[in-house]
Image: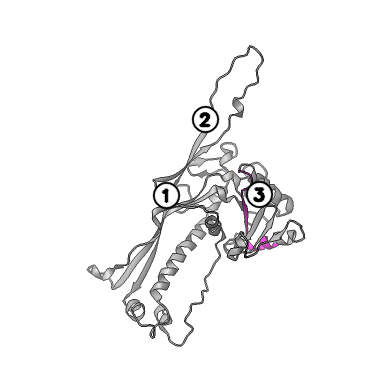
Amino acid sequence: MSDLSIATEELVQRTFVYEVGLREPILAMLMTEGKVSSRGGTYITYDLVKDDAKDEAQAYAAGEGLTVAQSEFLDQAKFKYKYVQMPIRYNVDDEIQNHLATSEVKRHDLVTLITERAQDGLRRHLTVRLHTASSTDAGKYVQSIYDACDHSRTYGTVTSSTTAKTWWNGASLAGTWADRDTAMTVELNNLRTIGYIVDRYVAPGQKKYCFLPEGLHSKVRGILEGKVSYQMGTADNSKMAKFGFKSFMYDGVEYIADSYMTLNSQTDYLLMLNPDTWELRLHPSAAFKVTPFFDQSQVAGGADEKVARIKFAGNVCCKKPNANFWNSTAT
């Protein structure tokens, strides 16, 4: 059956039953923590203080002179705006038989549904991109969580390695900045150690979220259920559980089950993120904006249909990768 015949069929329940819902906890984290901003500009840039002055301090004895040296303290990360568009289209049948029809004829407004699903589809696309490493730093896709948390790569035009600019790598459990894909057992000591290294370079009291595929989330929950400091999330508190996510607290970290990681075969991934280091930057001129519908029948040779698009310009940026952790072989 076509969408039109389904949406105008009589004697059925007048509500849609959504079969395609998917929870998006990382986007929820960004919105909950106020890390979505709308600002213009050609690029998204962050000025980075990459070093301190401790090596300039000089112990001296009476009569010794001052050795003058000047280190380079600054670097700059620069991210491109990435562009995404989503089409919205309905034809003359949809308009005449549904959109303009009386409520006695139709049970749903199909055009409204098409628009809503397009908006939801664009948000879902962002979830896919957040979980998909970009091919290059300068590619056309919105950059992912994994781009930021990886080791030895170019991110925001800054190139890191195991020996150079290690402060721009994601956190390393072994301190080698080369162990992102080294097998790691999910157990209490490792979870605590990850929390310690994520905390090293951030202000005290900042939140930490650990995103896990459902299998690993269940395993960690089983390990911790007997612990005094284990606390289940509830729907009426400030945690992600209020949005319906499976969530619990342990040792200052909120552990969240991410269904997308499971469905995307990322069943051995573990992410621990500090939300204060992230930003979803939207350009004001294309922040999920819907253009007016254009009647294609006004153009010679055009079909009798109306077309609009939703426009997105922005990027997901991390300004402090070393306060975030990713392991791709956790068991």
Q: Residues within 10 Å of mark 2 (few under 14, many from 20)?
A: few
- For the record, the magenta segment spans 202-218
Q: Amino acid at mark 3?
A: Thr
**Dot 2 corresponds to which residue?**
72
Question: Residue 39, which numbered label?
Answer: 1
Q: In this rendering, is residue 61 above or below 309?
A: above
Residue 249 position by quadrant: bottom right
Are the two marked residues, 1 and 3, in contact with CB atoms closer than 8 angstroms? no
Q: Which image quarter holds the N terminus?
A: bottom left
Is 208 covered by the magenta stretch? yes
**Callout 2: helix, strand or loop?**
loop
Residue depicted at 35% across the width and 77% down the height: 99
Q: Residue furthest front?
A: 236
Q: Quick one: SS at disc 3? A: loop
Q: Which mark is residue 118?
A: none
| Residue of label 3 | 182
**Name of the residue lying farthest toward the top:** 63
Residue 295 in which image quadrant: bottom left
Mark earlier in primary sequence (2, 3): 2
At which x and y percent is residue 131? 54, 57
Q: Name the mark nearer the viewer: 1 or 3.
A: 1
Percent position of residue 148, x then y: 54, 48
From the image, which quarter does the C terminus lie in?
bottom right
Q: Position of residue 3 (x, y in %)?
A: 42, 78
* Three-letter residue code for mark 1: Arg
User: Closer to the camera, 176 or 216?
Assistant: 216
Query: Does residue 270 show up?
Result: no
Residue at the image position 42 percent from the left and 49 percent from the top: 39
